[in-house]
Image (tube, helix red, strand yellow):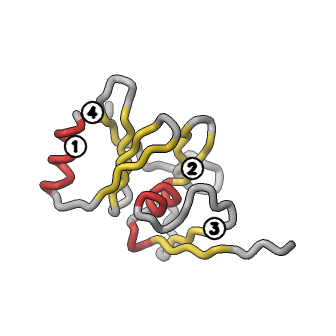
Amino acid sequence: MSEKFTYSDLLNKLSNHEIRYNEIQIATTSLICTISGDIYRKMKSGNWKQVKNCINHNCGYNVILIDKKQYTRAKLILYSQGGIKLEDKHVNIFHKNQNRLDCHLNNLTCSLNQVKL
């Protein structure tokens, strides 16, 4: 069973390990994304739970469902750090070490595809 945290306990845990993080809001969902690739989601109870990082997409990615939309873990990490916008449909995200589950910020790079009209 996943460990649940109160907001203050989670922030204490992250600051004790000197992990940089940003809190983001997508629709009604609150997330905390760390530069090490971890994502914590606020539950209805008010507690926070770490989103498990495992393959749950047929292409080998970890996707997170938010308001009936799928977001890859990598896209959420880059968005939380100000690297991309969620609305950008023409962004390619690459994992430098080819491991699609390794979403550490230093392992991610992106490029914008130009749309031809």
N-terminal-most mark, 2 or 4? 4
Give the labeled residue for mark 4. 4
Q: How far apart, in angstroms, are the residues tagged by discs 2 and 3?
A: 13 Å
N-terminal-most mark, 4 or 3? 4
N-terminal-most mark, 2 or 3? 2
What amino acid is found at the position of numbered circle 1 in the picture?
Answer: Leu
Q: How far apart, in angstroms, are the residues tagged by discs 2 and 4?
A: 22 Å
Q: How far apart, in angstroms, are the residues tagged by discs 1 and 3?
A: 31 Å
Residue 107, image x and y in percent?
A: 43, 72
The quarter of the displayed image where residue 22 is located: bottom left
Marks 1 and 4: which is nearer the front?
Answer: 1
Give the labeled residue for mark 3. 91
Residue at image coords 55%, 48%: 63
| Callout 2 crowding tier (Cα within 10 Å): few <14, some 14–19, many ≥20 | some
Give the labeled residue for mark 2. 71
Identify whether 29 is placed above or below 38. Answer: above
Picture disc at residue 116: none
**Dot 4: element:** strand
Q: How far apart, in angstroms, are the residues tagged by discs 1 and 4?
A: 9 Å
